[in-house]
Image (spheres, grey):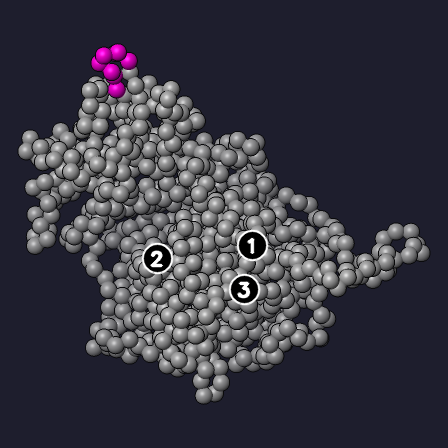
């Protein structure tokens, strides 16, 4: 089978304004399948509106005409002297000069102006350029008359099984109570201070991320948590901070160097944010070191697991470690001298290094050398004679950092030299990729070249032992081009990422009790050694998956495997953002392609820090005959979608999966995520349309049960928030409950503030970045914000609205951030099964309740941990509750 390689699809083909080319509403769209011809068509953007996300631009005129606009625009619309002749249309090119050109963004974009571009570094700063936050009208949202709006996720009247939409609910899903707005209504905010008067209503993105990592650190401080889990949270804190510095802080530094320091929505500029981030980071890393040295390490020693230094060893142990050094470490090391003939060596990012000061005893001269700690060897070495006994884990073990062993044997590397001092140090570099996609003829090639440059990024942080001499410190700072403020002095051992190796120890008594996911209730009536028939179950009913409580391997993974092996399956289409190199998902796709099936993989090679791995297995897919599409120019494909087309007796049937998490078997065991397995005709048509957008050109596509970014997701959510305000004023049930990883988008936040000020109850459960304020008088008195961190990483996204008493609920891949709403392809799917809606509503409601252990966002912007109730009893662990519920399902089946 021939391999099909698709060039990146231009951003313009997806942002789809369709303003000039859309037919009149009554005209059928010949490009749309017949069963969706009646779906509502979004109107043209209002003239003069600012493009989505552009917080700085005033009301702008319609985009300037293109050179070919003359042929499209009526003569009466031309500006100029009366009676001036219309310009003649350009002559067509000769037939032998016909050229196929890439799509022009203006062929597909709205007429409201240029598309929103957030920041000049990938992932964006997620802040507008000015301190004044955008109002809905400045983002082109929610201020148009109700009749001018369409809800992208709504079914067409008469389409599918929903039936016609009543007049009172036009524009919304069937059954949703969305009253038509009266022609003259009082302003719900009359008498209230304008939103713009609350200058601090947006928390700074970087500082609120620091709050999140502090909550991770507080998990390590929790003495009720198993010891090795506490060590694991210490390592997570370090890993999080590393990535934050490699991307976010590196971006701040680059902006400052370039002189691009506008005031952000939080009211701070880049200089102020960097100063505050640096102070918080130093405070938190010092706190982390104290937790390890003063609490976790002594507690582990009491349980028989010791992390030792050289002075803690006996003579026999030192001798045995010396032999170990000679045989297993010394051959791998490479000392690098620094002198006029040996310039200061390149220090790779996040590597551990020893800075060594030596003296030549003959000349008396001092020299500097660097020794890199090999990353290919374990960070923690087992002390001989203190190995962990597999038959008796309780007997304990002893470990020592590898850099300690190397430091004690430097004389083997520099024979004849006097070792005056040595100090451990570690450098963090800018590892943000900057691919100019619009100029890249081939996105894959451009990404491969950029990956080669990544490791040579500028230095952004230097970590050193707090015993370092002033001379060596100055030498490193000068050689790496850093400031004194960029230096973190910490007690050894540096880089507590290495504590993850402690967590790998097989000591069950010091870890969370083992949890084995169960087969989802909708896939099997009872647990069995044989795999469930996923297709048969989906034909009977939709299936809701809640990972890791529901097994990924017996649901999504089995779905793909059965599709690959089933001779009746004709095609498989899937998005892949992150997955493991040895993924059974990838193997199944290869098997399907080799069996002659049509297989399409939308591979996002720009997935941060997985770029190289994604390129590797994408090449493997191509060689097997899979049609690989490397995303879209200017957008990351972040949605989690899977579509299987199967030939059945009644004709072709499409089986779908829409999820909130990656198709990654390993992370599926540790990430809390949701998924929907369905054969629903509307969802199938939506996925077919979206995959056609991702692999081809479909600027006029419409959706029934999906909200899709970057076109309709923000507008759809804001519209539903505004509907809750109208419902509340009409005396109907009105509330909003949202569960996301991050919320920073100012337009959505302002809409939630308006809902709160109108009296609508708003509950938000957010794991990480949180730019919204809660409980502020006159602004957010009806907003409660909670954060849950636990054994599993809370990763699902749920958007629930009371909708007048018939809950409208979505799940999907999108967080409330600029990058998700403007620069990624995201999808939310509306859940329609009443049982599923009730379950998910209960999950998000309980997560936000005062009965569950969580962090509460206070009006002053601080977070307070609540783990005990007023009676002193420990509050409920929501993850423990869901694990218990999963186990009880297994017992009920037996």
At horizontal 59% and vertical 60% (from top left) the residue drawn is 14
Tell me which label, 3 or 1, sits earlier in the chain. 1
What secondary structure is the magenta-colored segment mainly?
A: loop
Q: Check disc 1 and report the residue beneath it.
A: 633
Residue 878, horizontal then vertical, whole percent: 31, 59
Q: Are marks 2 and 3 in contact (CB under 8 Å)?
A: no
Q: Is residue 511 left or right of residue 81?
A: left
Classify mark 2: helix, strand or loop: loop
At horizontal 20% and vertical 23% (from top left) the residue drawn is 415
Q: Check disc 2 and report the residue beneath it.
A: 581
Q: Which residues are magenta?
A: 358-365
Q: Is residue 572 left or right of residue 415?
A: right
Q: Check disc 3 and report the residue beneath it.
A: 695
Q: Residues within 10 Å of mark 3 (few under 14, many from 20)?
A: many
Q: Quadrant of residue 577?
A: bottom left
On the question of residue 61 being in view, the answer is yes
């Amino acid at each position: 089978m021939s391999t099909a390689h698709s060039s990146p699809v231009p951003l313009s083909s997806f942002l789809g304004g369709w303003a000039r080319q859309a037919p009149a509403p009554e005209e059928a769209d010949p490009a749309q399948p017949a069963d969706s011809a009646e779906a509502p068509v979004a109107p043209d953007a209002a003239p003069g509106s600012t493009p989505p996300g552009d917080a700085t631009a005033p009301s702008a005129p319609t985009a300037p005409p293109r050179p070919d606009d003359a042929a499209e625009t009526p003569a009466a619309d031309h500006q100029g002297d009366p009676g001036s002749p219309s310009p003649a249309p350009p002559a067509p090119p000769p037939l032998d000069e016909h050229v196929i050109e890439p799509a022009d963004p203006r062929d597909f974009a709205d007429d409201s102006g240029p598309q929103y571009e957030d920041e000049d570094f990938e992932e964006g700063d997620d802040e507008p350029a000015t301190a004044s936050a955008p109002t809905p009208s400045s983002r082109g949202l929610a201020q148009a008359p109700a009749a001018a709006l369409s809800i992208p996720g709504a079914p067409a009247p008469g389409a599918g099984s929903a039936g016609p939409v009543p007049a009172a609910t036009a524009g919304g899903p069937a059954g949703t109570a969305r009253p038509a707005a009266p022609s003259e209504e009082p302003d719900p905010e009359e008498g209230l201070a304008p939103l713009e008067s609350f200058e601090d209503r947006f928390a700074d993105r970087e500082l609120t991320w620091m709050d999140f990592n502090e909550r991770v650190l507080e998990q390590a401080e929790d003495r009720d948590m198993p010891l090795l889990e506490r060590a694991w949270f210490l390592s997570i804190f370090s890993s999080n901070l590393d990535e934050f510095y490699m991307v976010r802080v590196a971006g701040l530094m680059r902006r400052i160097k370039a002189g691009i320091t506008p005031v952000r929505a939080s009211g701070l500029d880049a200089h102020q944010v960097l100063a505050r981030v640096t102070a918080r980071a130093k405070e938190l890393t010092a706190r982390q070191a104290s937790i390890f040295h003063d609490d976790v390490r002594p507690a582990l020693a009491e349980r028989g697991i010791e992390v030792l230094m050289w002075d803690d060893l006996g003579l026999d142990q030192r001798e045995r470690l010396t032999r170990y050094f000679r045989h297993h470490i010394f051959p791998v090391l490479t000392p690098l001298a620094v002198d006029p003939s040996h310039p200061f060596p390149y220090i790779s990012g996040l590597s551990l290094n020893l800075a060594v000061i030596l003296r030549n005893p003959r000349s008396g001269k001092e020299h500097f050398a660097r020794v890199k700690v090999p990353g290919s060897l374990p960070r923690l070495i087992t002390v001989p004679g203190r190995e962990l006994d597999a038959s008796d884990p309780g007997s304990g073990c002893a470990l020592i950092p590898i850099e300690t062993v190397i430091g004690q044997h430097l004389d083997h590397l520099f024979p004849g030299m006097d070792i005056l001092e040595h100090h451990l140090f570690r450098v963090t570099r800018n590892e943000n990729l900057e691919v100019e996609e619009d100029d890249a003829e081939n996105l894959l090639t451009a990404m491969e070249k950029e990956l080669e440059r990544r490791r040579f990024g500028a230095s952004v942080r230097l970590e050193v032992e707090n015993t370092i001499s002033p001379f060596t410190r100055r030498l490193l700072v000068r050689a790496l081009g850093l400031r004194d403020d960029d230096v973190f002095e910490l007690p050894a051992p540096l880089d507590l990422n290495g504590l993850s190796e402690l967590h790998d120890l097989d000591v069950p008594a010091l870890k969370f009790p083992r949890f084995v996911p169960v087969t989802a209730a909708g896939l099997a009536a009872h647990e069995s050694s044989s795999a469930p028939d996923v297709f048969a179950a989906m034909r009977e009913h939709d299936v809701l998956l809640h990972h890791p409580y529901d097994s990924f391997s017996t649901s999504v993974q089995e779905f793909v495997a059965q599709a690959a092996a089933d001779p009746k399956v004709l095609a498989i289409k899937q998005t892949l953002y992150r997955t493991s190199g040895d993924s059974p998902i990838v193997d199944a796709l290869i098997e399907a392609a080799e069996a002659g099936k049509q297989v399409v993989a939308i591979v996002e090679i720009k997935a941060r820090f997985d770029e190289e791995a994604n390129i590797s297995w994408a090449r493997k897919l191509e060689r097997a005959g899979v049609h690989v599409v490397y995303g879209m120019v200017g957008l990351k494909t972040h949605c989690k979608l899977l579509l299987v087309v199967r030939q059945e007796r009644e004709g072709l049937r499409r089986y779908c999966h829409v999820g909130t998490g990656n198709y990654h078997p390993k992370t599926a065991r540790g990430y809390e995520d949701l998924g929907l397995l369905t054969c629903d005709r509307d969802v199938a048509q939506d996925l077919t349309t979206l995959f056609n957008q991702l692999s081809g050109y479909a600027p006029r596509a419409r959706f029934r049960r999906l909200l899709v970014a970057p076109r309709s997701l923000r507008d759809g959510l804001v519209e539903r928030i505004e509907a809750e305000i109208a419902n509340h004023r009409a005396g109907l049930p009105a509330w909003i409950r949202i569960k996301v990883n991050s919320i920073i988008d100012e337009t959505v936040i302002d809409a939630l503030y308006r809902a709160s000020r109108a009296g609508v109850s708003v509950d938000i459960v957010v794991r990480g970045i949180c730019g919204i304020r809660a409980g502020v008088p006159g602004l957010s008195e009806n907003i409660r914000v909670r954060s849950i961190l636990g054994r599993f990483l809370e990763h699902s996204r749920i958007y629930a609205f009371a909708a007048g008493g018939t809950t409208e609920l979505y799940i999907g891949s999108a967080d409330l951030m600029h990058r998700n709403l403007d620069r990624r392809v995201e999808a939310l799917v509306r859940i329609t099964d009443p049982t599923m809606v009730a379950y998910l509503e209960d999950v998000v409601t309980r997560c936000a309740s005062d009965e569950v252990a969580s962090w509460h966002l206070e009006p002053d912007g601080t977070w307070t941990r609540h783990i005990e109730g007023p009676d002193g009893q420990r509050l409920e662990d929501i993850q423990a509750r869901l694990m218990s519920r999963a186990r009880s399902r297994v017992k009920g089946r037996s």
